[in-house]
Image (spheres, helix red, strand yellow):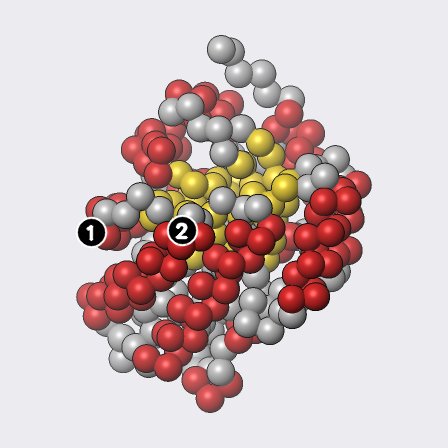
Amino acid sequence: MRYAISSNAYTRFSLNEAIERIHNCGYSALEILADHPHISPLAITPQEVKQVTRLLEQRGMSVSNINANTAVSVYPSIHRIGETVFEPSLCNRIEEVRLQRIRYTERCIDLAAEWGASCISVTSGKCLAGNPPEQAYQLLVESLTQILPYAEKRNIRIGIEYEPGLLIENANEVLRVIAELNHPLLGINLDLGHTEVLGEPLAGTIQRFGEKIFNIHLEDIRGRKHYHLVPGEGDINFGEVLEALQFICYDRFITFEIYSYPDDPDGAAKRALAHMLSYTIPC
């Protein structure tokens, strides 16, 4: 198990600044946010990609995941009606919007291959007006069906992240998608804070997904409220979490997603790493 932190904790800084600061906080890996203000996958130039590659190499940094959960930077303004944080989504009923998210996701797969990440994460999006859940679900499946052959070409895994309030919002629903598509490169980006908010058993959920967990998002939660806290500042039993991950022989990244501290991301990053490294898990 290796620790990383998402660059979405550093949205007041450029991606290059975020990489430098994360490195200075003692990390050797980070997740890259594929959205404003860090990168816009459909607009980033080859020169900019190479600049990031060089900086990662110079600092000895690995990339745990390309966070393709949101794509606000590419959402066409003509379609911005209501809640759009997760738009353009893979389940949007408007084909033009859905195709844009597919192109965005394919570009994220390219960037994962370029920067040495083994996976990207995606979300389902919400059921917006005029798009009831079963219709949205079928559109999501169709979108993933189009994306997976592209992932095969690059050998990049796609982890679906479930989140309260989205079309795919719990463990049962993401398992339905994974089972229906039955593809070796499709699994889960497991955000254990979401698991805690939903009241799902942490150890049981980890064991239930097993080898289908491609990346872990980790934060603390207090009182089952969806607000990301630094590990150690909420209710989650991280000793239990680490034992469960050891039980399934998890050897991929644990990525802190602690974007709730924009005024002091360095302090949050250092506290998160120190807290998790304080645990000793018996062999």
Mark 1 falls on what kind of element? helix
Q: Are marks 1 and 2 in contact (CB under 8 Å)?
A: no
- List the residue tagged with mark 1: 180
Taking depth in this image into account, of 79 and 251 the one nearest to the observer is 251
Q: Where, by quadrant of the figure, is residue 5 drawn?
A: top right
The three-letter amino acid code for the residue at tag 2 is: Ile
Name the residue located 48 percent from the left edge and 40 percent from the top edge: 216
* Residue 102: x %, y % from top left: 40, 68
* Nearer-the-camera pick, 274 or 200: 274
Left or right, 258 with respect to 76, comes to right
Residue type beneath disc 1: Glu
Q: Which residue is mark 2?
A: 158
Judged from this view, the residue extending furthest toward the bottom is 78
- Could you tell me which residue is drawn at 58 percent across and 53 percent down? 114
Q: How far separated are the C-alphas under marks 1 and 2?
A: 15 Å
User: Residue 6: x, y in percent?
Assistant: 61, 49
Q: Residue at x 28, y 47 (%)?
A: 183
Residue 146 percent location from the top left of the image: 31, 64
> Is the residue 202 above or below the residue 126 in the image?
above
Q: Measuring 77% from the left and 55% from the top, which residue is drawn there?
A: 17
Label for residue 24? none
Q: Position of residue 152 (x, y in %)?
A: 37, 52
* Nearest the eye: 265 or 77: 77
